[in-house]
């Protein structure tokens, strides 16, 4: 992403819905086969605040795991999870821009949780990343695949409206930030991997007032909030307009607000 669209992240806001955000990663790891290395070497691309990276250490307690992210705020929060693990392995974190990341060592597993949608050209990086995966190792990731949902469509429409397009035009994630599932399967199969690709739609029940807006403030809204950070009045006005649109699109029920959320999963095992 360009400097004008790279979002500033708020770990506290992101973690307000930590359980919903962590569940897909656990389900992704459930489909990852055994790793060839002993101890295994693992890279977590776009590790965020590190709360799901620790799942890797729980699954492979003897592994050496590095979480990579380009957000100083997220890495500062993740640092609290760093250190030796109970099985003799270790967890650390490092700065990396995934638009440029080129592995300098071999990994038994390269994994990513809800990050590649922020990386333009990520499909073209797969070949380089897989070159760094050991024979019999795995490349696995999950990404949101709901850019056409009201959550995002309404925000894009608002950002492109006459009032906001001068400030927010081109700032938000593009509609092609995630590819069709078949595109991923085809690319990885042509790179010599056995690919398992599937989708799941979670009917997330969010609690609290304007819960869908609160969800978006942790992820999808970050580029807009960043672009308007120097103008609190404009930031609050945009937020209020978006909030009103979300209230209509996602009505509240007595038990909470339902946010349907489709995610795309890929587990690709490299041949021996």
Image (cartoon, rainbow, N blue to C red):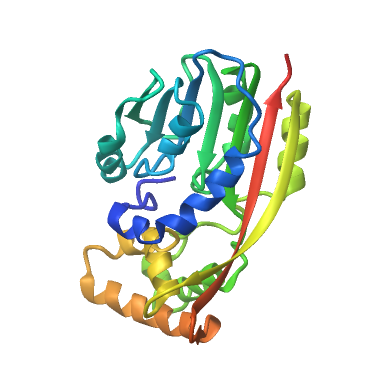
Residue at 78% x, 37% y: name it.
186
Residue 102 can be seen in this image:
no
| 134, above or below 187, in the image | above
Residue at 45% x, 65% y: name it.
169
Measured as percent of width and height from the top left, residue 182 is found at 77, 45
Dividing the picture into quadrants, the one containing residue 47 is top left
The quarter of the rendered structure image containing the C terminus is top right
Q: Name the residue furthest front.
A: 86
Measured as percent of width and height from the top left, residue 158 is found at 47, 76
The quarter of the rendered structure image containing the N terminus is top left
Q: Quick one: 168 or 239, which is closer to the camera?
A: 239
Dividing the picture into quadrants, the one containing residue 97 is top left
Measured as percent of width and height from the top left, residue 242 is found at 42, 78
Dividing the picture into quadrants, the one containing residue 150 is bottom right
Answer with left or right where residue 220 lies relative to residue 183: left
Residue at 78% x, 28% y: name it.
190
| 250, above or below 33, in the image | below
| 41, above or below 119, in the image | above
Answer with left or right where residue 96 lies relative to residue 249: left
Residue 63 can be seen in this image:
yes
Measured as percent of width and height from the top left, residue 265 is found at 65, 46
Number of marks in picture: 0
Residue at 27% x, 41% y: name it.
72
């Amino acid at each position: 992403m360009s400097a004008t669209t790279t979002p500033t992240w708020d770990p506290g806001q992101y973690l307000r819905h930590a359980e919903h955000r962590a569940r897909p990663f656990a389900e992704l790891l459930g489909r990852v086969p055994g790793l060839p290395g002993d101890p295994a070497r693992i890279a977590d691309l776009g590790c965020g605040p590190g709360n799901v990276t620790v799942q890797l250490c729980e699954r492979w307690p003897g592994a050496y795991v590095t979480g990579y992210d380009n957000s100083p705020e997220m890495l500062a929060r993740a640092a609290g999870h760093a250190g030796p693990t109970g099985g003799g392995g270790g967890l650390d974190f490092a700065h990396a821009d995934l638009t440029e990341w080129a592995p300098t060592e071999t990994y038994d597993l390269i994994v990513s949780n809800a990050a590649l949608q922020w990386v333009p050209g990520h499909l073209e990086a797969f070949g380089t990343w897989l070159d760094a995966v050991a024979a019999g190792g795995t490349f696995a990731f999950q990404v949101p695949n709901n850019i056409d949902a009201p959550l995002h469509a309404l925000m894009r429409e608002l950002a492109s409206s006459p009032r906001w397009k001068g400030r927010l035009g081109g700032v938000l994630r593009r509609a092609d930030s995630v590819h069709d599932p078949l595109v991923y399967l085809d690319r990885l199969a042509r790179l010599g991997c056995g690919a398992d690709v599937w989708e799941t739609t979670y009917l997330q029940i969010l609690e609290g007032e304007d819960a869908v807006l609160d969800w978006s403030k942790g992820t999808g809204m970050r580029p807009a909030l960043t672009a308007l950070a120097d103008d609190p009045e404009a930031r609050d006005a945009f937020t209020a307009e978006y909030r009103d649109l979300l209230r209509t699109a996602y009505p509240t029920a007595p038990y909470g607000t339902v946010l349907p959320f489709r995610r795309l999963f890929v587990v690709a095992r490299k041949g021996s």
